[in-house]
Amino acid sequence: MNILEMANAPGMMLPDQYKRMSTVEMEDRVRGIKQRLGRSLFIPGHHYQREEVIQFADVTGDSLQLAKLSGSNRDARHIVFCGVHFMAETADILTSNDQTVLLPDMRAGCSMADMADIHQTERAWEKLQNIFGDTILPLTYVNSTANIKAFVGRNGGATVTSSNAKKMLQWAFTQKERILFLPDQHLGRNTAFDLGIPLEQMAVWDPHRDELIYDGDIQEIKVLLWKGHCSVHENFTVANIEAVRAEYPNMKILVHPECRREVVELSDYNGSTSYIINMLEKAATGSEWAIGTESNLVKRLRQAHQDKKIISLNPNMCPCLTMNRIDLPHLLWSLESIEADNIVNPIRVEAEIAADAVLALERMLQRA
């Protein structure tokens, strides 16, 4: 059963009673449950979550940071992960068997992670091995499914984050001549370019056409980029940058490396979510910033730094739609299911997949 089938299965849909509750009642109930469950409950919240949810998070952070904190929290019996499916999977992989990870809404997926499924990846790997032989090491962004992490782990590779991608690519090149980078082509391209690899030595693998997109001598290829992307960050454009430069000549542009190469190249700074947050914390009072990342985080940064002018690089940017599946009614439903001992939407990764995925995660954590 896939994620969509699970989300629509009987018992997986939000009961109507939660749709009729007022915000005040739901917030009071959440507070009460948190008080009653105490340290046996842990609620990690991703930076991109709605404010109505993030207000109840015990910690906020990026996906791997939250998964690691979940894994190190041995007091919590129940971890209600306010993020998306692949993040909850990673938390389940890193937690113990007597801990339960819940995702408040099973429809909270990730379009990027879904752009590389295990069948496409195994088919691509066989074809690439036939072309290049045993010269490729696979790396996957942590924004990928447990199956993809496991595939990478089985084949000697590792996971990467947007914070440590450069370090992990440097390590990968000490292991093999070429890298297959999944599933986000933009992070892979931007990181490899920063390491001095020219664009002419990068190719794109199209999983739908089962073919390598490249014009030149294939033996010159150093980086094989999976044709995937973040549907939020790909919507920042050169036109957005030109508009900001024209209207706000003193404004600095700060973007996430999941953005297209040409956007990163024209920005003033680029870096991970943590990098963006830290840059704003250190920025001078009165400074001006256009931020190229998810809009919930931009709003939160604007609220936290009212001494600075902060705008979204794309004024028409919508929040991450799948991340926004997690809302207050689903959070309350998840928490009340714990108290009723009738848990809904648990995330369980098969032991064999988890074991291989851990190999990929550990190879990264050893070098982080």
Image (cartoon, helix red, strand yellow):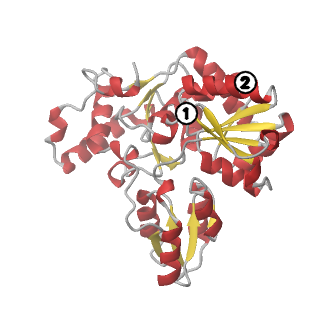
- Tag of residue 155: 2
Q: Quadrant of residue 228?
A: top right
Amino acid on which disc 2 is placed: Asn
- Give the image location of residue 355, x and y in percent: 64, 19
Which of the two discs, 2 and 1, sits closer to the camera? Answer: 1
Q: Image check: 8 left or right of 179?
A: left
The image shows residue 319, relative to residue 39, as above or below, that is below
Q: Which amino acid lies under the numbered mark 1 shown in the image of this protein?
A: Arg
C-alpha distance separating marks 2 and 1: 23 Å
Q: Position of residue 12 (x, y in %)?
A: 28, 26
Q: Quadrant of the N terminus?
A: top left
Residue at image position (47%, 58%) is 235
Q: Is residue 357 visible?
A: no
Q: Alpha-carbon neighbours of circle 2 within 10 Å: few (<14), some, or many (≥20)?
A: some
Q: Nearer the viewer, residue 166 or 188?
A: 188
Residue nearest the observer in this picture, 214 or 265: 214
Is 314 located above or below residue 183 in the figure? Answer: below
Q: Residues within 10 Å of mark 1 (few under 14, many from 20)?
A: few
**Which residue has dot 1 on it?**
209
The residue drawn where x is 78% and y is 54% is: 195
Q: Residue 300: x percent and y percent?
A: 43, 62
Comparing 180 with 342, the one in front is 180
Q: Quadrant of the C terminus?
A: top right
Number of the label disc, if any, that sits on residue 339: none
- Please say whether residue 262 is visible from this viewpoint: yes
Residue 263 left/right relative to 170? left
Q: Secondary structure at mark 2?
A: loop
